[in-house]
Image (cartoon, rainbow, N blue to C red):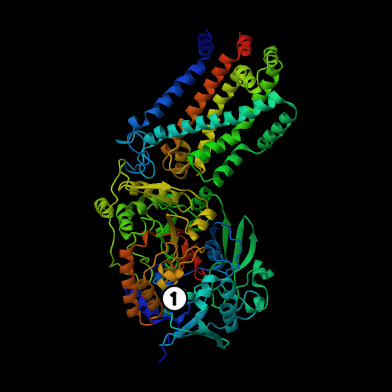
Amino acid sequence: MMNSDFWRAFARNKGAVLGLAILIAIVVLAAFASVFFPGDPWEMATAPFQPPLSEDALLGSDMLGRDIASGIAHGARVSLLIGLTSTAAALAIGVTLGALAGFHGGKVDDAIMRFTELFQTIPNFVLAVVLVAIFTPSLTTIVLAIAIVSWPPLARLARAEFLSLRSREFVQAAITTGQSNSTIILRQILPNSLSPIIVSASLMVATAILLESSLSFLGLGDPNAMSWGYMIGAARTVIRQAWWMSVFPGLAIVLTVLALNLVGEGLNDALNPKLARSRG
Amino acid sequence: MTRRLSGIPASIQRGFRRSVHRAAAAGLLAAVLTIPGTAALVAAPAMAQETPVRGGVLNSIVQPEPPTLMLGLNQQGPTQTVAGKIYQGLLTYDRKLNPLPSLAESWTVSPDGLTYTFKLFQNVKWHDGKPFSANDVVFSTSKFLMEVHPRARAAFSRCESIKALDDHTVEFKLKEPFPAFIQAFEVSSAPIVPAHIYEGSDYRTNPANTTPIGTGPFKLKEWVKGSYIQLVRNEDYYKKDLPYLDGITFRVIPDAASRSLALESGQVQQTQYSDLEPFEVPRMKTLPNVTLTTAGYEFVAPMAWLEINHRVKPLDDKRFRKAIAYAIDRKFIRDKIWFGLGRVPTGPINSVVKFYDPKVTTYEPNLDKAKALLDEMGLKPDGKGVRATVKLMPMPYGETWTRLGEYLKQALGKVGVSVVLESTDAAGWAQRVANWDYEITTNFLYQYGDPALGVARTYISSNIRKGVLFTNTMGYSNPKVDELFDQASRENDPAKRQEQYSEVQRILSDDLPVVWLLEMEFPTFLDKRVKNANTTAIGVNDTYESVWLAK
């Protein structure tokens, strides 16, 4: 079975298993945030500047008396939500354009690749900042901005896969049997090119979370959504008086991004048969 | 009858006596009265007991770096602090906002309140050596400032004539009484500029703008852009032996953390206005080498409030605005968001400004009252406890204002008013507020020493001007308020003026066109060796002629 093979390959990478465990813990934290920490994370629940291990604030409170632990739990939702949706959006744009370019080749390929390069020449983060600033920060605009700056590598990857698969016999056979282009792209080539795309998408979720945190850190987050980047950004001014306000959300980001990277590695091992074989 | 005020007006002399009695330093009065222009010493009698020493350079911070030091053309905060040492106005003001001599040695106001006559100091020279005369004052107030300085234009356009009676006497004749006129001669409100340089030129492009020529105790020696502005003693200053300092150097330090470090390490001996963020203040005030004061900002007297667009329902209903006021804990805002800087306001006028009256309707935090008012309006909570949803666009002026927005969202949420925060940049904020494209925002305005200059503009219906910032952007209109502000601005009798302003404060505190949040204070940190600094209502923007450094 493909499934058990996959798990065996994945489990061979101890780091990936650890990453997966951390990731599951974070997902659980996000899913049950309202159970663990009922109420609004913005609520000024306790006295400001409470250090960690205080009576009613395990990880301390921030400058307005908001519970840091509650902020981290609710912030996990925002981070994961933005990470996943923006990656999905980037996949949609990137894979579509890459598939079209790789499949059709020629002028279509040229046009799409020049367009992609246009985006690749602009520094990611700068473009994201500009986009969010122009369209006023909200969850939707942040997701779109991250997607818009993240799709080019996916497009190039999809194009390369399509270019190579397109000349394979099974594709040629599909063409001779008169299948339509869209059927060939969706049914024949795409399923066979998914592995590398899944691997880079899993890493892209981590990048997206980092991008969102950086935007929030700069004050370009959704002002109505508690997020880790926002917590660090707001706390950086008092870091000399209150380290806990920035350290804990910082740890949350580090752990999440690390977990996603480990999982990505594991996926790479499991899904890339050539690599798995060469490692023996 | 013309009231002759020799050098120092009567009210100040009363002030002298009070502080002198308090300080029990009888000799001081004589000393002060014989040295014209050093009246500022009185505000700090304890400091004045030491003998000033000549010499030394004061280091301070200028943040952000000003675009120019030509004070007539630019009155941003940092420009004022630096150029206030180079240029002078006719008057400066004590902590109670009573006029003190600056370029004018003495002045009289006719009993009908229409004629203001200023006697200027003799032997005043411009920094280029040319003599200063009444002609410079006439040129500055009737031509230069009228063209380039909106706030000065508002004051001096009330003049029927501005004349030089002789080389050292200037007479302003008003079209109708305007007692706040005496507050219009502060250095940033009406800096006196040299006629011999600017007369007949294009003021804004005059090449001399880069090398400011004033009459003040300090001259510009060198300005290394991005690094420092160096002022040195004006050896020809018209007051003998002044200034004490050899010079003042303002360092450009764009990074906030480096600014606090500069003060901590003693690299600078003074910080002012927003050089240090409010959250730094609790830590910095424990430093052994500096003292903190929040005095010296009485002339600007900033007031912060929730600006509410009355064109949007249900914000047009004063019961709703009162509910907002009851839902907010202003002490929390002052203590936790501004780290203790500022005072809890009672009404529209900052308590350090003239004609302030505390006997008004005030709003202590009271969630039950807030909910009762909302119930009365028929705004019942829905399934999620939400009675109404409003949009709040916090002023994009940094961390502190962002925190304030977050606090307000929570505070209003507790009474069922759901707040959606909108974020903007500075330009977008200004544009949206000026064009009434907002529901609620936070804002603060300077009050400039007199309700007629800095308070009325926010509430009178004639100042509802689309596209202009810092006007009556709420669209508040009450004919009685208009009438009272109008009468009070023309009333010569201070007692009657007080009555009118008291009544207007009572009406406004009940109508609640905006919800006042904080009488803001700025922190001034001074190294303990700096003496006599920051003694007037314009504090760090004053000339610093009698500031000295202890060895």
Name the secondary structure under disc 1: helix
Q: Quadrant of the C terminus of chain A?
A: top right
Q: Position of residue B65 (x, y in %)?
A: 58, 58
The residue that mark 1 highlights is: B39
Q: Position of residue B8 (x, y in %)?
A: 43, 81
B221 lies above or below A83: below
Q: Residue at x 59, y 83 (%)?
A: B133
Q: How many marks?
A: 1
The amino acid sitting under disc 1 is Ala
Q: In this rendered view, identify the residue nearer to me: B197 or B269.
A: B197
Label 1 chain ID: B
B438 lies above or below B461: above
Q: In this rendered view, identify the residue nearer to me: B396 or B274.
A: B396
Q: Determine whether, in the image, residue A145 is placed left or right of residue A121.
A: left
Q: In this rendered view, identify the residue nearer to me: B286 or B460.
A: B460
How crowded pointer 1 is (Cα within 10 Å; few <14, some 14-19, many 20+) is rated as many
A278 lies above or below B527: above
Q: Residue at x 49, y 65 (%)?
A: B540
Q: Is residue B48 visible?
A: no
Q: Residue at x 36, y 65 (%)?
A: B348
